[in-house]
Amino acid sequence: MPGNLTFDALKSLVTSGEIDTVLVCIVDMQGRLMGKRFLAQHFVDSAYEETHCCNYLLATDLEMYTVEGYAATSWSGGYGDYVMKPDLSTIRRIPWLEGTAMVVCDVLDHHTHKEVPHSPRAMLKTQVARMNALGLTPIMATELEFFLFEKSFDELRKSGYRDMEPISGYNEDYHILQTTKEEDVMRPIRNGLYAAGIPVENTKGEAEAGQEELNIKYAPALDTAEYHTISKHAVKEIAWAKGRSATFLPKWASDKVGSSSHVHQSLFDKDGNNVFCDPDGEYGMSALMQHYLAGLIKYAPDYTYFLAPYINSYKRFQKGTFAPTKMVWSVDNRTAGFRLCGEGTKALRIECRIGGSDLNPYLALAVQIAAGLKGIEDELPLDKPTSGDVYEAKKAKEIPHTLRDARETLRRSKFLREAFSDAVIDHYARAAEWEIEEFDRAVTDYEIARGFERA
Ligand code: ADP
């Protein structure tokens, strides 16, 4: 059970008055929690069966704009309802909010009661089911990096995001002294998430002033995506409660290191053995792992959009910053797009280092499982690993470097269209196009500063 409360346990807590509010949430295209706050009694009496939301929730941008050009919904289609169907195995306490529990929902078509195909949760479930059909379970972990700021979200917004002071004054990578000073925010995050049933491993300072990393234990892919989304939400909520703010923008300042979300992945069989391991294989890798990794590498340009979905995502990809763009793998080398970790142990896994902290984990995991699966199905051969500073590896191919390019590789991807359907890929290609259109309309500080006097 991914949550930590059964429905019966929730009912008892509602009866005893310990829980009075249930957050009923779906995950939107941006990987955010959207939904309603239910009076707990009403939820356990009837709303647990289903509730409803406007279907624009899977067709808006970050600012909740009603974006035109989607086949799935529109003004002419009347923006009707989706069914929010609570997945009762996901009920958990939200200890950092008083008297509150949360449930994650599937998004169903109002008429057919089938899952909406472009719902991120449905997309991940579909790819997991394809892998399960081979007797394999994708076991994954995502790392969450973010920056903490001294001031609250409201203060920063009102200042026009001008007065941005990170919570620490210097690079705090693995720094125990500096991170002690941040414990008023980070300790409630670790303990709150753990009490919500999320297997937190640790937090640490990262390689820039105010930058943090949160690590969560590996789990089946759907649980991992749920952990990621709820944790990201918790970081913002707990920072807010402490009068601070947190950002998952991949690059909040051009002269600061960016924030990523590395994805660790392996496949387990029905007995819980890591089938990536073969002591007789090269680097301890099984043939299956080699095919999976070859698929991940081959299709990286096709799915880059899902690892870097905004204009800002691409600002992170700078040489010498630990944000790799080369479609090669390496043995424990942080300059390559794909890093072999845990060599010689049963924790053998591949880490994809391309994704930014703004990725939607449901989508990022879904496309990588699909790419690995395609590698397995086609028995793709794996190239030799690259070593040294991969930023300087001239022959290594690159992933797309702009959202415009990533949208093109997404749109043209036969592999993604086969794995997810034309309708789903067209939907996300429109989302990418909208981000580009909006940015093309914007006049930025950069342009004013550069050209106001000198142009
Ligand atoms: P790093 O030093 O790169 O941060 P860690 O040892 O902290 O590496 O592990 C990173 C992540 O890898 C953790 O979230 C851990 O749970 C996850 N992990 C460990 N074993 C596996 C595995 N077999 N499959 C997927 N993820 C795994």
Image (spheres, helix red, strand yellow):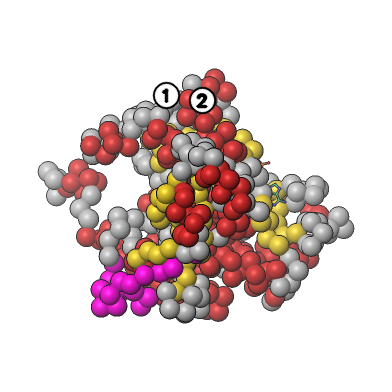
Instruction: Write the start and end of the magenta stretch as one range.
Output: 67-85
Residue visible at 49% across and 75% down in the picture:
113
Tell me if residue 297 comes above or below residue 195 in the rendering: below
Displayed-image quarter of ligand 1: top right
357 vs 386, left or right, is left
* Badge 2: residue crowd in 10 Å (few <14, some 14–19, many ≥20): few
Residue extending farthest left? 453
**Residue 70 sits inside the magenta stretch:** yes
Residue visible at 75% across and 51% down in the picture:
348
Which residue lies under the disc numbered 2? 183
Q: Amino acid at mark 1?
A: Gly
Q: Which mark is residue 231?
A: none
Q: Is mark 2 within 8 Å of ligand 1?
A: no
Comparing labels 1 and 2, the label whose residue is closer to the camera: 2
x and y percentages locating residue 97 in the rendered image? 46, 38
Residue 396 seen in the figure: no
**Residue 95 sits inside the magenta stretch:** no
Residue visible at 23% across and 37% down in the picture:
158
Which residue lies under the disc numbered 1? 169
**SS for tag 1?**
loop
Report how far apart the C-alphas of labels 1 and 2 lie in the structure: 16 Å
Tell me which secondary structure the magenta stretch mostly adopts.
loop
